[in-house]
Amino acid sequence: MTGSLERINMQIMWNRLISVVEEQAQTLIRTAFSSMVRECGDLSAGVFALDGRMLAQAVTGTPGHVNSMAESVKHFLDKFPIETMREGDIYITNDPWKGTGHLNDFVLTTPAFHHGKMVALFSCTSHLIDIGGIGFGPDATDVYMEGIYIPFLKLADRGVMNETLLAMVRANTRQPVESEGDVYSLAACNDIGCERLTAMMDEFGLDDLDALGGYIIEQSRNAVLAEIAKLPKGTWRNTMRIDGYDHPLDLAATMTISDTGIHIDYDGTSPMSKFGINVPHAYTTAYTCFGISCAVSSRIPNNAGSLEPFMVSAPLGCILNAPKPAAVSSRHIVGQLLPDVVFGCMRQAVPERVPAEGTSCLWNLNMRGQSLGANDAGAGYVVTVVTNGGTGARPTKDGLSATAYPSGVRASAIEVMESIAPLVFWKKELRADSGGAGQFRGGHGQSIEIQNTQGEDFEILASFDRIDHAPRGREGGADGANGYVGLGSGKRLNGKGFQTIPAGDTFIVETPGGAGIGDPAQRDMAEVADDLRDGVVSAEAAQRDYGYAAAGDD
């Protein structure tokens, strides 16, 4: 009985710890200056043991941040050993190779003290809209062109902020007030975590987290291994061709499932690019592990234990393991496609667990230009509007329309974007017929039209994929629609790179649709009728793809 009660108490404390880091994340959302954070949830938050292992992560957040941040705390500890940390200290970096993959993501780590004794570390990440350099796009040819690079530094020493560092941040961004505000937001986020943790420890009479942390990691590891034990053992391979920057790229994966875990090896993947679409290995690992987790262990909380059975390798110098000083600003364009690559391996072993290919990578609209009133840095406006395409059909359900998977970042509120930049969105609606036909249809993309209200040129820092190579259907399902970017005047734009939208013209965006699963002839005609009524499938497509004729049609 004592053993059962102890396990119950451990489980209660575990859940409470997850609620602590969720409040940490919500603090970041409420205080952030970055629209990507406060409107879209592009962040992560977590609590770590003193050896750097992640014990709990907030439910709110993105896999690319959380799973790479899970390793970054160990790098903080290498630079700043536990015995040197004091209450009130805060540490900061945006190192892409030891953080979350590109310079726009700042990572802060704060030691947590309980009655004078250090018991844990809190860490958090958020995306800053502008950190100087060439801007948030893929045109740079090395990381030094991409913005301010912060090594592992002390942001606060016993509660006193490093004003020199903050001055450097302000001086190297087009949004000095917002960028400094986001640094303070991150610091406040960790402070709340520390406060809530000590309240929890008082409530449960804990002096440290050693026993609870050990329980969390062991139970999580064992639970994942139990799920892996249910899978067939063997090796499977998959390749995916994507647009790249100036030429197509191939992502190749070999998945091996054994009794001890799942290993993904990316040998055979294309070499790194000279442009900013390269992926540091930490980000490759983050999204690969997330894809595996979705298919194998989605009900198990994310922590060091649940991640331990997943192993990821990629040859040094390939686009999924690009060493410093490679340009990496738009690493998400390639990195967020990795769950689909993994699913291509996994569907050969357990097809009932994985979807068809979707848009996968975010279609962020990175725009900037001059407005009538410049800010203190002499710059105009800089905005990142999060938009999404459709996800692939699921084994027994349609795909999701205009949904960010695998990133989880919410779409930007257009009313907010129009309030902070002289842009008007004349159109933002689901893109009819973009979801691939099938027994289960792919999710639909979006059709968007944008114009500058002040009659000025504006710039687009394009970072899009799935334009030349659409999401692929499976088991007879059709491919999703290709993406498109262009002008209202008819000119087609490039999917990647800096381009100008002329005054008076409109910026046209058609995000890709997800692919379908299964023979379209097997689709329930009632579902086709619903799609036709909702306007997401045209009468022509219903007839062509499904043999469906609306009442009254010849």
Image (cartoon, grey):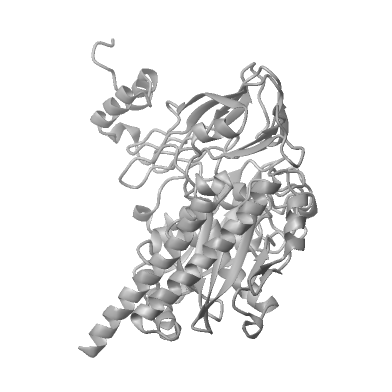
Q: Residue furthest front?
A: 160
Which residue is depicted at the point 47% across and 50% down?
408
* Residue 187 position (above or below residue 328): below
Instruction: Assign the N terminus to one quadrant of the image.
Output: bottom left
> Considering depth in this image, is 117 or 331 the residue closer to the camera?
117
Q: Quadrant of residue 475?
A: top left
Q: Is residue 330 visible?
A: no
Which residue is depicted at the point 39% across and 80% down?
202
Which residue is depicted at the point 66% across and 21% down?
454
Residue 544: % across, % down: 38, 22
Instruction: Assign the C terminus to one quadrant of the image.
Output: top left
Horizontal side of residue 223 vs 495, given as left or right:
left
Residue 209: % across, % down: 44, 82
* Residue 235 position (above or below residue 368): below
* Residue 402 position (above or below residue 237): above
Residue 525: % across, % down: 25, 29
Q: Quadrant of residue 163?
A: bottom right
Residue 482: % across, % down: 54, 32
Q: Residue furthest left?
A: 1
Horizontal side of residue 196 vs 34, given as left or right:
left
Which residue is depicted at the point 53% across and 84% down?
116
Q: Is residue 501 visible?
A: yes
